[in-house]
Image (cartoon, rainbow, N blue to C red):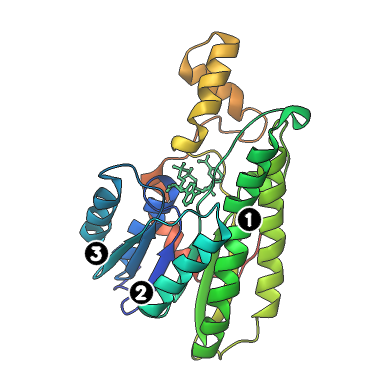
Amino acid sequence: MNGKMLEGRRALVTGSTQGIGLAVAEALAAQGCSLVLHGLARPGEAEAAQAAVRAAGAPDVQFFGHDLADAAEVERLMQSVLQDGPVDILVNNAGIQHTAPLASMPRAKWDAILAVNLSAAFDTMRLALPRMAERGFGRVVNIASAHGLVASVQKAPYVAAKFGLVGMSRVAALEYASAGSRAGGGVTVNCVCPGWTETAIIQPQIDARAQALQVPREDAVRDLLREKQPSLRTSRRGRSRASWCGSASRRRTT
Ligand code: NAD
């Protein structure tokens, strides 16, 4: 990629204090994009994420810590972000997981996973897309999962939320397909379905598998990945940086 293709653009990446969200933010920053970082940060984490994104090349960086499990907080987040300026790129990345058989899944976990992984994206898109359409430019990238395409046992709320996110992305892509013009760039909505990636969200599953099978961590990873990821290797943050910028500009919904 030549030059900085996102100079003058501003992106909001939810759940960007760590993991995939931070990698996305760094990739956008490397293309000259200003960043609004967001997430439930532990002490020092927000500052570290902001420093990383500045070092990657973001001319301007903000941070918001609103809890996406609360719909009113999502509204407040969007109000705060939009009153400071337009959002050109919205990445709905924040996500949580809890594994248990359907019959014993706590109702509170169902509510929380649906709220963070699906409803929050509904609200951010509901509030951001009309303004993108008015300006004739917008890019929405929703981070679903391989579990937005196939199921696994013990993941009823996560699979339901991710299938929902894939479907909602398709609806939004259709609704905004004719917004703006070819010259202005228009408004696109894409959904990415990553496979297993080495971040905090999957650690409890690896630990539980190692414990259940009484095997070392690397064997537990291979066992966990066997069903869905034939390489039997997790993805790592650093490797996919270049492709993130490319995929955001393609009109593709998976
Ligand atoms: P992670 O746990 O490292 O990061 C999750 C981020 O979401 C953090 O920044 C956290 O602060 C934020 N977050 C969680 N709950 C929140 C809440 N209530 N309010 C606000 N922010 C909240 O996870 P990750 O692996 O980087 O996951 C990012 C996305 O990628 C998620 O949507 C996840 O479902 C998806 N995904 C991950 C994998 C994987 O193997 N890691 C695979 C497929 C999809």
Quadrant for the N terminus in the image: bottom left
Mark 1 vs mark 3: give the one in front. Answer: 1
Type of amino acid at the residue the image marks with label 1: Leu
Going 55% across and 75% down the picture, which residue do you hit? 127
Residue 133 in the figure: left or right of residue 50: right
Mark 1 vs mark 2: give the one in front. Answer: 1
Marks 1,3: beta carbons within 8 A: no
Type of amino acid at the residue the image marks with label 2: Leu
Question: Marks 1/2: CA distance?
Answer: 27 Å
Q: Between 79 and 205, which is closer to the camera in this rendering?
A: 79
Judging by the rendered image, the residue that carries numbered circle 1 is: 118
On the image, the x and y values in percent for residue 180 come to 56, 89
Does residue 235 sit above or below 180 in this rendering? Answer: above
Q: Residues within 10 Å of mark 1 (few under 14, many from 20)?
A: many
First reached walking from the N terminus: tag 1 or tag 3: 3
Residue 149 in view, yes or no:
no
Question: Marks 3/2: CA distance?
Answer: 11 Å
Going 25% across and 48% down the picture, which residue do you hit? 48
Judging by the rendered image, the residue that carries numbered circle 3 is: 57
First reached walking from the N terminus: tag 3 or tag 2: 2
Judging by the rendered image, the residue that carries numbered circle 2 is: 6
